Image: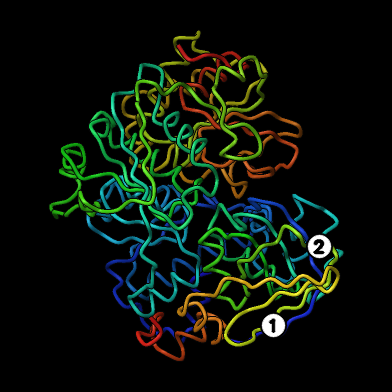
Amino acid sequence: MSANLTGRARRFGDNVNTDYIITSTRKRETLDETELARYLFETLDPAFAASVRAGDIIVAGRNFGCGSAMEIAATVILAAGIKAVLASSFSRTFYRNAVNNGLLPLVCETSNINEGDTLTIRSEHGAMFVRNTVSGAVTVAAPLPPVMEAILSAGGLVGFVLHSGRPVDPSTR
Amino acid sequence: MAIDYFGRMGGTSVRDASHVMFACDHYAPPTSDRTRAFHALMRAFAKQHGIMMHEVGDGISFQIATEQGRALPGHLVIGADSHTVTCGALGLFATGVGSSDLAAALVTGTVWLRVPETIRVTLTGALRPGVMAKDLALHLVGMVGADGANYQTLEFHGPGVRTLSLDDRLVVCNLGVEMDAKASIFPFDATTEEYLAPRTRERGTSVMSDDDAAFAREILIDLSAVTPRIARPHAPDNVTPLASAIGTAVQMVFIGTCTGGRISDLHAALAVLESLGGKVAPGVQLVVTPASREVAERARADGTLDGLQRAGAIITETGCGACCGTSGVIPGNGATVVSTANRNFKARMGNATASIYLASPAACAAAAATGRIVEVA
């Protein structure tokens, strides 16, 4: 799959759970992502949602998206105009939900990325490179499993199932 | 939600509706127009496709699946709830997925899963009196950490397994996801057989690793050395000995959820409350939420719910209750809560100013009776 993204790093720490991405209490009133995006990360930083710009890139430490498997945690991030999350590791349910909705989750070293750094994400020769235009550092992200790549290339699981008629195309194993 | 994805995936029929169940558990009862409409949509979809629908009051999805013989040894179970891993107590592979994965399974009857590595947890000895399965589970979470089992399966082995009741095993499996485990699995044995006998005539086969399998990690736990534990705010793996939190004043106690709302939990809670004077301390709100209708009916029949209510508890509708702030009682500003639940993230129960501690039903009941975190006798 190909990627060509440039955006501003928005820095988070380790073990950001899905309740911190969007608190369950907000889901009582609406499941409209654009509405819920106003409360993105409100528990960690009430000012965050207002400061988001389309194209921002979330940068986190270990275990991003742990806790509840609620898919809306991935789709609210997309609704805020964010297309990629970089983390040193992801919780498996968030990782799946991200891929299934076309949000790019990249596993890479993130400790030297600071809030506000401008990042570019580019796929070259089958690998995904993250370049920090402030520090000049270039990091190679871990390759996505073939199934994940195929789902992302289809724009998510909806496109993938529509295209292949099943969640796993045996040829991509 | 899954029904939306189902439509977007071009779904017209559910591949095998007899293997699907819906449960209204997170908004039980619904408190907004949105959640009422959500339940109505679930009912309509279930009716159209012949899916078993479990209403508000029936209980938490995977608790119902466990009680009603829907999830059986050897099955592969997926659920749109991370705590679906709980079912692994019956000797099966159960894991949580999001709505789109669930919808794809409804459309196609298949799911893709990476085969996980396995952590073998060998249990020896037996828990001492006053120490509950929740303490064992918190002990393990504290040891392994919030992502220590990410993408991996926890498998429980050893002679200590047979000393744990089915309810105990459900608690331990439930907390597996607080270590990011993909599944938590107990072996099928006489305890499993006894639990399932009145619930189903179907026979299952266990799914444990072969004896000569290679494991990613080995953990050895002597159950007799496990002591009461507590998870401090605001992370389930922020685990310390209960003894280190003695004296902490509490304003709300929550006994319920898929971790601590089973019949043995309610029995333990009432016994502790009665041993400490039988009354909830002034200034403390005790909220009790049975995990399912079966649990509630048993607790009503044997007088446990009456006893808890007489002691001063509020008994709420079965389901997820106050655990995730979607329904039920929300803590007051600045409240310190001690809960039998599995997550204590900031704002988890619907109020970001509350501080949530996680402990065993016995420790929670003792806190309700005294207004403080105290040793469990």
The kind of residue on which mark 2 rests is Ala
Q: Amino acid at mark 1?
A: Arg
Relative to B220, residue B8 above or below: below
Label 1 marks a residue whose chain is A
| Residue B63 visible (yes or no) | no
Sort mark 2 into few (<14), some (14-19) or many (20+) by Cα contacts within 10 Å: some
Q: Nearer the viewer, residue B289 or A65?
A: A65
Answer left or right for A92 relative to B217.
right
Residue A161, how many percent across, how many down? 45, 85
Secondary structure at numbered mark 1? strand
Residue that carries the numbered disc 2 in the rendered image: A49
Question: In x, y percent, where is residue A85?
Answer: 67, 68
Please give the residue where the numbered disc 1 appears in the rendered image. Answer: A122
Which image quarter is the N terminus of chain B in?
Answer: bottom right
The earlier-in-sequence mark between 1 and 2 is: 2
Which element is circle 2 on? Answer: helix
- Examine the rendered structure and indicate whether residue A35 appears above or below residue A17: below
Residue A85 visible: yes
Crowding near the residue tagged with mark 1, few <14, some 14–19, many ≥20 C-alpha atoms within 10 Å: some
